Image (cartoon, rainbow, N blue to C red):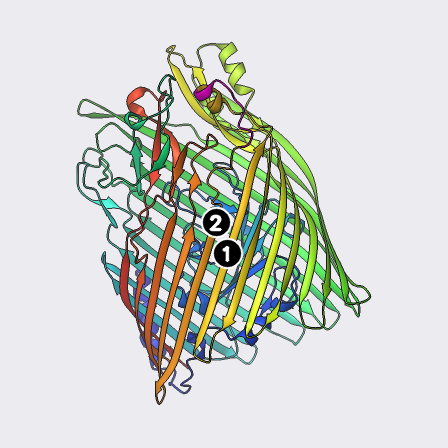
Amino acid sequence: MIHRRWLIIAGLFITQFSFSNQNESVESLFNLTLEELLSFTITSRRYEESYRDTNRPLSVISSSDMQNNLLEDIYDLAYLVPNFSFRKNFGKRQERPVMRSISSINGEPPVGILIDGVSVSNISTTYSLTGVQHIEVLRGPEAALYGRSTFGGAINFVTKRPEDKNDLSFKVSGGNFGHRQIDAGINLAVTPNLFLGVGGKANENDPLIKNSLGSGGGGYAAEKNEHINLALRWLPSKQLEFFYRGYDHQDDTGHMPLYLQNASSNNCFLQTAIQYFCGKIETPKQVGFSNGIFPWELGFEKTNERHHAETQFRNEKLQFKFIYSQSDVVINDTYDFDFYELDSTFANDTIHIDEQTFEIFANIKWPALRLMIGSSFFEQEDWRISDLFFLQGTNLVEDLGNPHIQNVDNKAVFSSIDIDLKNNFALDIDLRYSKDSIDYRNELPGQLEQGEDSWSDFSPRINLSRRFENNWLTYFSVAKGFKPGGFNISLNEIDYFDENERDRILAFLAYDDEKLITYNLGFKGELTNTYASINLFLNYWDDLQLTQSLSYIDGTENMRRVSTIVNGGAATTWGAEVEFDTQLSNQLNGKFTFGYTESNIKNSETSAQEDLTGNPSIDGKEIPNAPELNGFAGIYYKKNIAENLNLKANVNLAYESRRFVAEHNLATIGSTTKLNANVAIAKGNLQLSLWGKNLTDDNAPESVARFGDAATFFARRAFGISLAEPRRYGISLSHILE
């Protein structure tokens, strides 16, 4: 089979002879002007409207924003959006977005990831921004529009659609740590009404962090990934449109960048069995894992195949759309399970997620009214198994796991109505009724454990807005969101001491929905050469899905611990966010964002808190993994220095404040400050860039999670530290042929 990267390179040479460089414009390589930003068309409310007219908390990241700010993935994207944090956790294995302090340690993420308006699972950690036209980030519950996955907000990746033109774009990059990358895209007008787009990317780098302590050499965070996408757009008439996009991604990276700060570092609550570490957790100067004894290569492999097809009919009064989407994700991760540099325990996890979505809706427009009605069906099968390997002497002993299989069916009907009132007031109402049905089974030796449950939810959103003569818009909204319930399936697998112990722990088998009500007051409009957006919000969060570590006695009469998700108590979060896009001069633009959130847990208890302090209450604590402050400042300079020759220089600084590791609010993750810069010379459509990421070489941990210390039979607690990427720099060459 021909390697994907060679297909991409071959495509470059083929198209080199097909197109001539007829257009010298480089405008697509630079920022949107303020006027272009205000007229930017978005689809986050399931119909086309301008960014200027959208009356809800929304950030738009354009393709030029992605280029100028060196955005490569969702982790980079998060720095540009106020009150949004997305950090790596256990490498690329877990999605942990945080929006307005609404966070999650396990279970369903609280922020929905959408591609062209359709929810997807377990894709965002490896999703490439190649082929993405722009990104719409909605803060606050969007369950009324998008359902179960958008409890705290939604991130909608809008992909590029082929157009009526012929062009080729490509970019090649190289840098430190052996970084090498090629990125290419082709747009063809096959006929006057049939357009084709093909894009691909191949990316590699050597280990970013040396395995300096463990046996076998190697390192963390080596990367090798490839993807290719194909898009077709057919316009048989002015009213009818067919669109298809296929996406295939292959990710093959090294051992997850995580190191265990073991239990010997505990420095407080030493009188308890599990002990704890209090204070700021630092990234160790030397890290390591064992890969010398394991017979297979340790690392992370992920494949994702996705298909999206839609049919759309529209005229001046009616829009009708049908969408079908299907994705298949397979993950295989083999790693040093105890994260020590000593030989002891290894794990191999396999995850297979298959999901599909059917959706149909219609928008009907009158002079002062828009009505949308629709229905959707979402189906997911999630198959997981984990095998453990223990080193006994010089032999590896295999402990085969048991498959966990979970099926989710979600059926929903939804509606939206926009009414123009008198005196420039408008009323918008979004409604959704949905039903989640979840069933699971564990294929245990000699028996089958299975169960099922369902949850029904009604999710409204009401929004009142007013536009003023000076083009300022103010709006007030009330919205309800929910995060689905589920099962702690692994509790069925445990070898308990007796039936009484089994019954006690299985009381925690199921957990219910979380619920969120948000009040939002927003202002947006134009100042002198500046567009500003300001939002104030208050969240009431109930039935929190908290992570608890439960103690139980196993069949050998040893005390063990198991992590579960349980509902417990409530919380409030409130805060503000500000965004400015400004034209400082004819040659200088700026982008500035700031987010502040205050969080407070109420009426909540956890067994982990009781184990430490003797008092289970966590009232008054802050929500874990949720930064209080974040901010972004970007300056973008462009100057014509000769005929058809331009200089471009961009620099941005991103800040995120400290976070608490767990509900105890005892251990903290330090703040981060990251500086990125990019200097480019462009002649026509040819551009040469020098770039640097994390020039401050900030090494604060990406995230920290409580973890059992294998050396003490999982009774005492350690911390798994997800390591940050070091300073990176390189050179890129890009070109557009038209």
Q: Quadrant of residue 15?
A: bottom left
Q: Is residue 325 magenta?
A: no
Q: Quadrant of residue 391?
A: top left
- What residue is pinned by disc 1? 594
Q: Residue at x 35, y 59 (%)?
A: 675
List the single residue furthest toward the front.
528
* Residue kind at label 2, given as amino acid type: Leu
- Which image quadrant: the N terminus? bottom left
Residue 715: x and y in percent read 37, 20
Distance of label 2 from label 1 (alpha carbons): 8 Å
The local secondary structure at tag 1 comes to: strand
Q: Quadrant of residue 436?
A: top right
Residue 90: x and y in percent read 37, 40
Q: Looking at the picture, does residue 651 appear above or below residue 619? A: below
- What residue is pinned by disc 2? 629
> How crowded is the residue under tag 2: few (<14 C-alpha within 10 Å), some, or many (20+)?
many
Q: Residue at x 52, y 53 (%)?
A: 595
Q: How many marks?
A: 2
Contact flag, marks 2 and 1 (Cβ < 8 Å): yes
The local secondary structure at tag 2 comes to: strand
The magenta stretch is 612-620
